[in-house]
Every structure is written in C-alpha cells, then in structure tokens.
Image: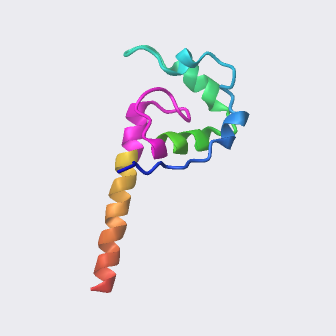
Amino acid sequence: MARKQLMIDTSWQAYANCLGVDPDLFFPERGASTREAKEVCRGCVVKDDCLEYALASGEKFGIWGGMSERERRRIRRQRAQERALRATALAGETA
C-alpha cells in the first residue's frame, strides 16, 4: 500500500531571509548556540510560514521559523491539548 503524501505549499521559501545562508547554521551540533540562526529568522517576513511548515511536516531537527525542536514540541503539545479541550467541549454540547 502506498503512503499518502502530504502536499504542503513551500512557495514562501523564495522570500525567506535564510535563502543563500549556509544551512549548517540552522542545524547546530547538540548543545551549540542557536542564537545566530534565530537572528536570521527574527525579521523574516515568512517566519510564520516556515514554522507552520516545520510543524505540519514533523521536522525534528534544526531551527525553523525561529524555533528549535524543543520549542516546536511545546507548540505541538499545546495545540494537542487545545484540540482535546475543544473536542471535550463539543462532546458535552451534543450530549
């Protein structure tokens, strides 16, 4: 059975501040500073698109949208909790 591929719009990448920057900057060694990469992201006009791309595609490494994997995990957990609360509230309304 073939895996269903997730189609994600990446046209925003053409406007990213990191275009042309060494990708190694965004994938620092464990324990290394992420400050320089986050500085590139700071004023980027597509930072939110980049972050949403990383969240939707499950990027496990690197700085995306100005956030590390740890920060993205926190967002995923928070969103999952919010979805669960909404589902619980909806279930209570229909009962």
Instruction: Name the image quarter holding residue 39.
Output: top right
The answer to which of 1 and 77 lies nearer the viewer is 1
Q: Residue placed at 49% from the left, 39% from the top?
A: 54
Q: Quadrant of the C terminus?
A: bottom left
Is residue 57 on the magenta stretch? Answer: yes
Q: Residue placed at 37% from the left, 59% from the top?
A: 82
Q: Position of residue 25 (x, y in %)?
A: 55, 16
Looking at the image, residue 5 lies above or below residue 27: below
Q: Position of residue 47 (x, y in %)?
A: 62, 38
Q: Residue placed at 72% from the left, 35% from the top?
A: 14
Q: Report the side of 62 relative to 46 (left or right).
A: left
Q: Report the side of 10 relative to 29 (left or right).
A: right
Looking at the image, residue 29 lies above or below residue 8: above
Q: Report the side of 7 relative to 76 (left or right).
A: right
Is residue 14 on the magenta stretch? Answer: no
How many discs mark residues in the rendered view?
0
Q: Residue furthest bottom?
A: 95
> What colour scheme has been applied to the protein in the rendered image?
rainbow
Residue range (magenta): 55-75
Q: Position of residue 31 (x, y in %)?
A: 37, 15
Looking at the image, residue 36 lies above or below residue 1: above
Looking at the image, residue 94 lies above or below residue 20: below
